[in-house]
Amino acid sequence: MTTDPADELAADSAKRSHAALFTPIARIVHVLICGIPIIVTFIGLFLPYFQIRTPDSAGTPISWATASQIQGSARPFISTLVFLALALVPLVLQFFDRKMPSNLLLGSSSFGLIAGGVALGNVAVNLEPGNIRWVEYNGFILERGIGFGLILAGAVGLIAAGMVLIARVWAAIRRREHILAQQ
């Protein structure tokens, strides 16, 4: 029994439209590009963001994770943590792209960019504590900790990584559409 060449071409085309957008190496590159800023920002959430001390003491470190224990707000910690989790979505979805539309991967690729924007916004809002004058008036010294630098660097890295991931996904979708159009 012979098969119609048009049917074979249609079956081959259907298979290719659901083929992986990225090679395994490209997927690992995406995980590294986006994963490193996510990890840096995540670690920064738990390290001292501020350190309040007196001239003769080592001081008390305050991180975003512990700010609510000293009458601070947990909003920067929670919102940044939620958006960091969302930034992981496109990294996981790229391994399952045979079972989903390309537009879903393209749309979710913006999560890294959004997570970086949220973290950077939280850094801008929390550049100094609200009671800075009270702290300085009472003889305390306020210093930024390593958490501040890590969150800031991670946020900027996430914005850059998000833009790179969006561009790479867009290019891969265009490349696949071009190949399908030639068939």
Image: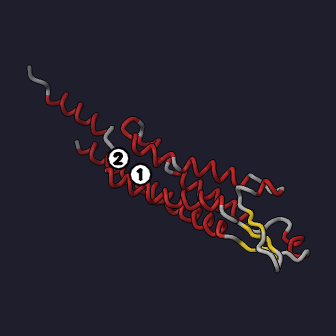
Query: Percent position (x, y) of residue 102?
Result: 41, 42
Question: In whole angstroms, how far apart are the C-alphas of marks 2 and 1?
Answer: 8 Å
Sequence-wise, which precedes: disc 2 or disc 1? 2
Query: Percent position (x, y) of residue 19?
Result: 31, 41
Front-most of 5 and 111?
Answer: 111
* Quarter of the figure with the N terminus: top left
Looking at numbered disc 2 in the image, what kind of residue is underneath it? Answer: Leu
Image: 12 above or below 152: above
* Quarter of the figure with the C terminus: top left
Number of residues whose C-alpha sits closer than 10 Å to that of mark 1, classed few (under 14), some (14–19) or many (20 or more): many
In the picture, measured across the screen, residue 20 lies left or right of residue 3, that is: right
Residue linked to disc 2 = 21
Is disc 2 in contact with disc 1, using a CB cutoff of under 8 Å? yes
At mark 1, the secondary structure is: helix
Q: Kindly indicate the quadrant of the structure image that contains residue 114.
A: bottom right
Residue linked to disc 1 = 169
Residue drawn at the location 56% of the way across and 47% of the way down: 86
Q: Kindly indicate the quadrant of the structure image that contains residue 147.
A: bottom right
Quick one: which residue is furthest to the left in this view? 1
Quick one: which residue is furthest to the front in this view? 57
In the picture, measured across the screen, residue 160 lies left or right of residue 144, that is: left
Query: Percent position (x, y) of residue 138?
Result: 91, 74
Front-most of 171 and 69?
Answer: 69
Front-most of 96 and 147?
Answer: 147
Query: Percent position (x, y) of residue 176?
Result: 32, 47
Residue drawn at the location 60% of the way across and 59% of the way down: 43
Number of residues whose C-alpha sits closer than 10 Å to that of mark 2, classed few (under 14), some (14–19) or many (20 or more): many
Looking at numbered disc 1 in the image, what kind of residue is underneath it? Answer: Val
Residue drawn at the location 41% of the way across and 45% of the way down: 94
